[in-house]
Image (tube, rainbow, N blue to C red):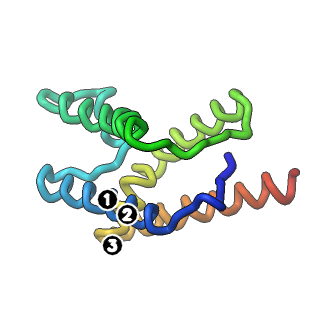
């Protein structure tokens, strides 16, 4: 994936981060739940009574909001420099990692770090370190 750094605007990134933080805060304050995407999606695999509708609405929002935004403004162009097999393996590894780590970057990195959860701090440090190591190996060692 490539990033158009010439089009990066820190103010919109800051506003987006603040909106994510506000949404996560409201989600825990009003609903008593952590806004961790893997946990929300995983809860649909073994649904509990009365637990499906909000999960589906949450996930629908993740898909529909960018679409709705595209009606008002152009979305940034994204290009992925990987083939389908690489994306499949990467997705499987991320899925396995979220199971072993008991959550994903949204649950640990956004919600858990904000609560100063030791488990989330350790998990987020591991996510970031693994990302650095992966980029280092794939872009600088094996390229």
Q: Which residue is mark 2?
A: 15
Query: Which of the two marks, 3 or 1, is nearer to us in this view?
Result: 1
Residue that carries the numbered disc 1 in the rendered image = 19
Q: Position of residue 88 (x, y in %)?
A: 63, 30
Residue highlighted by disc 3 = 116
Instruction: Give the distance between the C-alpha atoms of the residues marked 3 and 2, in whole angstroms.
Output: 22 Å
Q: What residue lies at 24% left-to-right and 33% top-to-bottom?
A: 57
> Which of the pair 80/127 is nearer the observer?
80
Kindly indicate the quadrant of the structure image that contains residue 89: top right
User: Does residue 139 appear anywhere in the picture?
Assistant: yes
**Residue 116, percent across and down?**
33, 72
How many C-alpha atoms fall within 10 Å of the one at disc 3: few (<14), some, or many (≥20)?
Answer: few
Secondary structure, mark 3, is loop
Q: Pointer 2 and pointer 1: residues touching (CB < 8 Å)?
A: yes
Above or below residue 53? Residue 118 is below
User: Which residue is at 12% across, 30% downward?
Assistant: 50
Can you see residue 41?
Answer: no
Vertical comparison of 71 with 113: above or below: above
Residue 4 relative to residue 41: left or right: right
């Amino acid at each position: 994936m490539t990033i158009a750094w010439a089009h990066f605007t820190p103010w919109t990134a800051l506003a987006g981060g603040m909106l994510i933080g506000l949404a996560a805060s409201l989600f825990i304050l009003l609903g008593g739940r952590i806004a961790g995407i893997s946990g929300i999606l995983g809860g649909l695999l073994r649904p509990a009574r009365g637990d499906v509708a909000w999960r589906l609405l949450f996930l629908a929002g993740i898909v529909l909001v960018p679409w709705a935004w595209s009606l008002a403004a152009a979305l940034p162009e994204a290009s992925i420099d990987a083939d389908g097999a690489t994306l499949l393996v990467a997705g499987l590894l991320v899925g396995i990692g979220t199971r072993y780590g008991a959550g994903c970057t949204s649950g640990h990195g956004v919600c858990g770090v904000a609560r100063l959860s030791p488990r989330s701090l350790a998990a987020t440090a591991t996510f970031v370190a693994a990302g650095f190591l992966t980029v280092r190996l794939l872009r600088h060692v094996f390229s």
